[in-house]
Amino acid sequence: MTDSPAPVRPDRRAELAAGLARVRSRIADACAVAGRDRSEITMIAVTKTYPAGDVVALAGLGVTDVGENRDQEASAKAAEVAAAGVRPRWHFIGQLQRNKARSVVRYADAVHSVDSARLARALDGASATARDRPLDVLVQVSIDGDPARGGALPDAADPDAGLGPVAEAVAGAAGLRLAGLMAVAPLGWEPERAFARLAEVAAGFRADHPHAGALSAGMSGDLEIAIRYGATHVRVGSALLGMRSTLR
């Protein structure tokens, strides 16, 4: 049986509350500037390297969505958090190997990083025996078209890595639900350029998949620009939880 995490110290809870207030204010201001409704934006608290107690504390502060990028850490943390009676919506946002599919589908509510038809099929097969509802999937798209960086390739017909074929593999899988797209601004690109390009790709994608409107983009340093260009989910780590090395 998994033990519940130890409660966070009062000063740590105060730090988390202050960080959350700042991030919520930034999101609200960004929505006002972009002429968008605040309810359109989901903030995902990226808790990689942070303890399960922080997740429980954030849930107590009203955070409903949590992101992790390594299965080994995420699976153990999800179990600890569940043992505390807390059940946030877990988003897997890191690169995922097919051999981890069976583990991830047991705790994740959404996977943001599907970039191949083979991975989609692995998740679908794993979901068939481990879940009673479809797994939400966002297809990770490559903004710069560099296959070495990960992400499905826009305008490519590659049957495994082209954006169209990957999306069709997800949409046609009984155990998956195509929810939208995810992207990370490429190294060396200004966020404005990256998210403008992503908005172009997303417009074409939604023409083919009108019910897959989620757009996961933007992190602590560039969430305002991502919201301006249509992000529905922003993934926030350090701005919310602080720098991990400073925690005691």
Image (spheres, grey):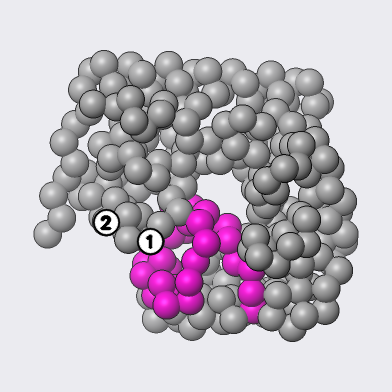
Looking at the image, residue 215 lies above or below residue 145: above
Callout 2 secondary element: helix
In the image, taking residue 205 as reference, residue 60 lies left or right, namely: left
Tell me where residue 86 appears, x and y as whole percent: 30, 44
| Picture residue at 82% right of the left edge, 61% below the top | 205
Q: Quadrant of the C terminus?
A: top left
Q: Residues within 10 Å of mark 1 (few under 14, many from 20)?
A: many
Report the number of numbered marks: 2
Viewer-side residue, 156 vs 208: 156
Say which residue appears at 43% left-offset and 59% top-offset.
Answer: 108
Q: Name which quarter of the figure residue 42 lies in.
A: top right
Horizontal and vertical percent position of residue 134:
53, 69
At label 2, counting other C-alpha atoms closer than 10 Å, the crowd grade (few under 14, some 14-19, many 20 or more) is some
Q: Quadrant of the N terminus?
A: bottom left
Whole-angstrom CA distance, mark 2 to mark 1, is 8 Å
Q: Are marks 2 and 1 in contact (CB under 8 Å)?
A: no
Type of the residue with mark 2 = Ala
In percent of the image, x 74 and y 62: which residue is there? Answer: 146
The circle drawn on residue 81 is none
Of marks 2 and 1, which one's residue comes earlier in the chain?
A: 1
Q: Nearer the viewer, residue 81 or 222?
A: 222
Classify residue 156 by image quadrant: bottom right
What segment is highlighted magenta in the picture?
89-117
Residue 8: in sight, yes or no?
yes
Q: Is residue 138 above or below residue 3?
A: below
> Which residue is drawn at the image coordinates 48% and 35% (left, top)?
237
Residue linked to disc 2: 76
Q: Which residue is mark 1?
A: 71
> With respect to residue 22, does 96 lie above or below?
below
Q: Name the spot of residue 204 as percent of width and height, x first.
A: 87, 59
